[in-house]
Image (cartoon, rainbow, N blue to C red):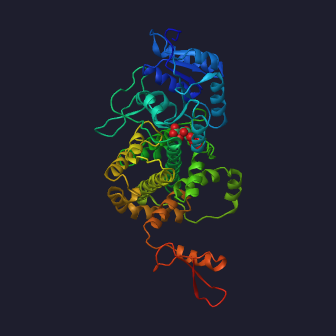
C-alpha cells in the first residue's frame, strides 16, 4: 500500500474488465499500483479481488478516489497506464492529468484499441509536455490477467522505461517449442520464456499492427463460422458433433485459440432450455470497429485484404436479420442442400483444407497490409517479431504463427507469405480440396464469402496477367484515362483516339 515514504510505481486509470485484470497482473509481477476509476464501485472491485487473491500478504494495490489522489500516491516521474475506451476519453484524461501537472519525464500509456492515426496525433500534440506512449493489448480479459500479447510503440526513451514492465506482464512462449507457457494462477506469473511484447516502432505503429491483428481475427472467426455452417447444412450435424470435429482439427495445423473456443461454444448447452446454446444465440454479429478500420486502410492504400473486407461485410449481412427472414420465404436456393453419408468423411476433410488455405491467405493479406503501410510511414516493422508476439496471449494465437515467424526469419523482406516455400507447398498440397469445398458450397447454396474471396485472392495473386488490361482499355475509351503498354517502359502513357481515327497518341 502506498504512503509518502513508499509511493506506488504505476498509476492505472480505468478499472473495467481489462483495466482491473491488467492491474492484478502488474501486482502479480511485483509492481505497486495506484488504481483509479470514476466509478467507485470499480475501485472497490479491484481492491476486493486483490484482497481475495493475495491471502494474508500485504495489499499490492492502492485505491484512489480522484485523479489528484492517484498522482499523490505515485512515485515520480509518473508512469500512468490508461485502460479506458478509445477516442475522446483518452484526450479528456490526458488533458485532466496535464492540468494537474505533468513533466517531460512522465509517461502516459494508452492500452485501448485506439485508432492509430489518433495515436500519431496525440504523440505530436503532447510532445514537450509529457511522453505519450501506446501499448495495444490483445488477449481479452484472461490475457490481461495472466499474460496478454502487447504491441507497444512510441519514442525509444519511453520504451526503455516500459520494457521491463511489459515483458513481465506479457504472455510467454517456450522458445524450444514455440508454444505458449500456460498461466492461469493468481500470484504465480510465468517468469521464463520469450515475452510476447516487442517494440513495434514509432507512435501509431503498435496500434496499426493491433488493428491488423483484429482484422485477421475477424477473417479467422468468419472462416471458422463458414466451416461450421457448411458442415451443419450439408451434413445435418449437431453442434456437439461439429465441436468434436473442431477438437480433432485442433490437433493439426489449424491448432489455435479460436478453433478451441469455437468447439467450446458448440459443445455448450443453454442453461435455460438445455438445447445447444449456439442455437439460442441470435445470428446478428456485433462489432466495435477495428475490422472496419483494417478494411478501410487496405482499400485506402491499395493492399487487398479481401478476407478482412469480406468478414466485415458478413457481419453487416448478419445485421439484416429482418430482411433475411423475409427473403428466406421468397428467394429460392438449389434443390440439393445435403450430401449423403458415404461422402461425409471426404466432405469434412475438404472443409478442413479450405479453412486452412483460406486462413493462410487471410494472414498473408494482413502481413502484406502491414508491410505496405510500414513502408508508407517509414516504420521499419520487424515481421518475425510481430508473428512471434502473436504466438501466445492474443486472440489469434495459433501454432501456425510459429511457421509465420520462421518464414520471416528466413526472409525479412518476404513480399507475401504465399511466396514462402512452406506456405506455397501447403497450398499446393491442399488447394484441390479447397477448390472442391467451394464447389460444394456453391452447389449446396451455403454462403462462403471468406472462403471464396480468399481463393480469388490466391488465384489473382498467382496470375501473371489479369483482366486489368481490358479495364484500362475501358477507362481509356470512355474517359481518355490512358494506359501503359506491355512492350514499352513503365511510366509511359498512351491513349487511343477511340472516337476518331483510332490511332495511338503518346501522352507527354
Ligand atoms: C483482442 C480483441 C479485442 C476485442 C475486439 C472485439 O485482441 O483482445 O481483438 O481487441 O475483443 O476488439 O472486436 P469486435 O467487437 O469488433 O468483434
- Identity of the residue drawn at 58% across and 66% down: 335
Nearer to the camera, 78 or 225: 78
Count of numbered circles in the view: 0
Residue 72 in view here: yes
Whether residue 118 is situated above or below residue 466 in the rendered picture:
above
- Point out the quarter of the image occupied by ligand 1: top right
Q: Please give left or right for residue 289 compared with residue 434 in the image.
A: right
Residue closest to the far left: 176
Q: Position of residue 199 (x, y in %)?
A: 43, 38
Q: Please give left or right for residue 145 compared with residue 385 in the image.
A: right
- Identity of the residue drawn at 61% across and 21% down: 42
Q: Where, quadrant-wise, is the C terminus in this rendering?
A: bottom right
Q: Quadrant of residue 126?
A: top right
Q: Quadrant of residue 336?
A: bottom right
Q: Position of residue 145 (x, y in %)?
A: 48, 27
Q: Position of residue 322 (x, y in %)?
A: 71, 51
Residue 113 in view here: no
Nearer to the camera, 411 or 505: 505
Q: Position of residue 187 (x, y in %)?
A: 42, 19
Residue closest to the far bottom: 501
Nearer to the camera, 225 or 82: 82
Q: Please give left or right for residue 389 compared with residue 277 in the image.
A: left
Amino acid at each position: 500500500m502506498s504512503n509518502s515514504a513508499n509511493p506506488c510505481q504505476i498509476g492505472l486509470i480505468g478499472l473495467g474488465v481489462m483495466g482491473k485484470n491488467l492491474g492484478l497482473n502488474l501486482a502479480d509481477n511485483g509492481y505497486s499500483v495506484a488504481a483509479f476509476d470514476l466509478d467507485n464501485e470499480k475501485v472497490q472491485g479491484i481492491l476486493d479481488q486483490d484482497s481475495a487473491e493475495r491471502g494474508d500478504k500485504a495489499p499490492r494495490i492502492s485505491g484512489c478516489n480522484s485523479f489528484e489522489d492517484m498522482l499523490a500516491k505515485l512515485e515520480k516521474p509518473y508512469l500512468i497506464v490508461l485502460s479506458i475506451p478509445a477516442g475522446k476519453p483518452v484526450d479528456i484524461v490526458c488533458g485532466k492529468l496535464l492540468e494537474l501537472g505533468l513533466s517531460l519525464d512522465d509517461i502516459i500509456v494508452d492500452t485501448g484499441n485506439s485508432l492509430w492515426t489518433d495515436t500519431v496525433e496525440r504523440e505530436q500534440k503532447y510532445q514537450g509536455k509529457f511522453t505519450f506512449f501506446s501499448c495495444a493489448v490483445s488477449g481479452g480479459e484472461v490475457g490481461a490477467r495472466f499474460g496478454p500479447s502487447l504491441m507497444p510503440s512510441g519514442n525509444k526513451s519511453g520504451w526503455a522505461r516500459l520494457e521491463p514492465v511489459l515483458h513481465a506482464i506479457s504472455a510467454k512462449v517456450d522458445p524450444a517449442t514455440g508454444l505458449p507457457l500456460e498461466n492461469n494462477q493468481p500470484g504465480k506469473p510465468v517468469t521464463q520464456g520469450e515475452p510476447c511484447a516487442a517494440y513495434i516502432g514509432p507512435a501509431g505503429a503498435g496500434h496499426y499492427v493491433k488493428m491488423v491483428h483484429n482484422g485477421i481475427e475477424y477473417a479467422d472467426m468468419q472462416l471458422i463460422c463458414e466451416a461450421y455452417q457448411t458442415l451443419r447444412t450439408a451434413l445435418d450435424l449437431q453442434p456437439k458433433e461439429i465441436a468434436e470435429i473442431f477438437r480433432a482439427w485442433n490437433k493439426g495445423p489449424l491448432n489455435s485459440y479460436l478453433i478451441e473456443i469455437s468447439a467450446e461454444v458448440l459443445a455448450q448447452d443453454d442453461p435455460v432450455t438445455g438445447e445447444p446454446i449456439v442455437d439460442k444465440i441470435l445470428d446478428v454479429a456485433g462489432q466495435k470497429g477495428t475490422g472496419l478500420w483494417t478494411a478501410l486502410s487496405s482499400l485506402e492504400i491499395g493492399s487487398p485484404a479481401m478476407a478482412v473486407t469480406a468478414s466485415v461485410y458478413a457481419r453487416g449481412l448478419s445485421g439484416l436479420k429482418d430482411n433475411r427472414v423475409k427473403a428466406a420465404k421468397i428467394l429460392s436456393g438449389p434443390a440439393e442442400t445435403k450430401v449423403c453419408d458415404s461422402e461425409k468423411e471426404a466432405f469434412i476433410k475438404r472443409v478442413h483444407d479450405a479453412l486452412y488455405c483460406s486462413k493462410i491467405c487471410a494472414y498473408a493479406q494482413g502481413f502484406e497490409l502491414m508491410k505496405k503501410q510500414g513502408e508508407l510511414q517509414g516504420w521499419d516493422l520487424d515481421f518475425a517479431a510481430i508473428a512471434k508476439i502473436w504466438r501466445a496471449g492474443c486472440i489469434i494465437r495459433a501454432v501456425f504463427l510459429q511457421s509465420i515467424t520462421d518464414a520471416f526469419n528466413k526472409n525479412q523482406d518476404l513480399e507475401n507469405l504465399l511466396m514462402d516455400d512452406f506456405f506455397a507447398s501447403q497450398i499446393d498440397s491442399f488447394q484441390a480440396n479447397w477448390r472442391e469445398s467451394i464447389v460444394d458450397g456453391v452447389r449446396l447454396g451455403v454462403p462462403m464469402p471468406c472462403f471464396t474471396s480468399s481463393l480469388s485472392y490466391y488465384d489473382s495473386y498467382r496470375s501473371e496477367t489479369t483482366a486489368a488490361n481490358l479495364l484500362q482499355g475501358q477507362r481509356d475509351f470512355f474517359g481518355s484515362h490512358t494506359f501503359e503498354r506491355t512492350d514499352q517502359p513503365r511510366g509511359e502513357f498512351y491513349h487511343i483516339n477511340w472516337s476518331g481515327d483510332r490511332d495511338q497518341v503518346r501522352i507527354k
